Amino acid sequence: MKYLFLLIISGFLITSCTSTQTVTTDQDTEVEEEEAETNRFAPEWYNEEEKSVSDSLSFSGYAYAIADAEDRALKQSERVALSNLRFEIDRFVESVRADLEEKNGSNPFGTQQLIMNVRNAVQNLNLSETELDYDIQQRNGFYHVFTNAEISREKVVNMLTGVISNSTLSASLEDEQVL
């Protein structure tokens, strides 16, 4: 009886310590990657994990929308892409402002007034010169719209320096544009 009890407890310990995950091989992951590539219908420039980016030449915002009507999907995708574009521009301006605050102290670069003025300047930017690139596809009765909103860094900096009253911040934005 003692041995039977010990055997049962040992069995429970062994089974509770084993992994519940399934084992995958490199061959399985290669097949899954190939299937994902053939099933992908998004354009090459679209990455669902990257909503906005910037480089030395431009700012970009990306979006994807799906709707039963093409115009609804198009408007939604454009609205989100422009919002993501504004976010990227705001991130750029905020990083320049934060660098100035770190180098020169919080006055005036850390004041609430300047921060609000800068945020409002970005939110009120006229993005009518933004280039919009659409990829529209129809599947299963729904419209899938991918949008890339892109504007040149030079245009953004010129617009911002025209409305930001702090000359040091404006000059720093222009310096960052050259990078």
Image (cartoon, rainbow, N blue to C red):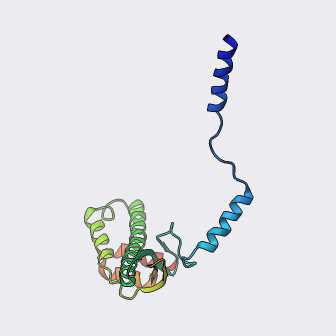
Q: x and y percent of residue 70 in the render?
A: 40, 83
- Residue 125: horizontal and vertical position, in percent? 32, 80
The residue sitting at 73% across, 54% down in the picture is: 25
Above or below, comparing residue 38 to residue 159 in the picture: above
Quarter-of-image position of residue 145:
bottom left
Q: Is residue 57 left or right of residue 95?
A: right
Nearer to us in this view, 26 or 56: 26
Residue 139 in the image: x percent, y percent? 49, 78
Task: Residue at 43%, 64% (x, y): give it.
Answer: 99
Residue 8 sits in quarter: top right
Number of on-image labels: 0
Furthest-left residue in this view: 113
Residue closest to the far top: 2
Which quarter of the rendering shows the N terminus? top right
Q: Is residue 115 above or below residue 77?
A: above
Q: Is residue 174 left or right of residue 56?
A: left
Using the image as rendered, state which of residue 45 and residue 59 is in the foreground.
Answer: 45
Q: Is residue 59 above or below residue 112?
A: below
Taking the spot 36% from the left edge, 59% from the top edge, the residue there is 105
The answer to whether residue 37 is left or right of residue 152 is: right
Q: Position of residue 91 (x, y in %)?
A: 41, 68
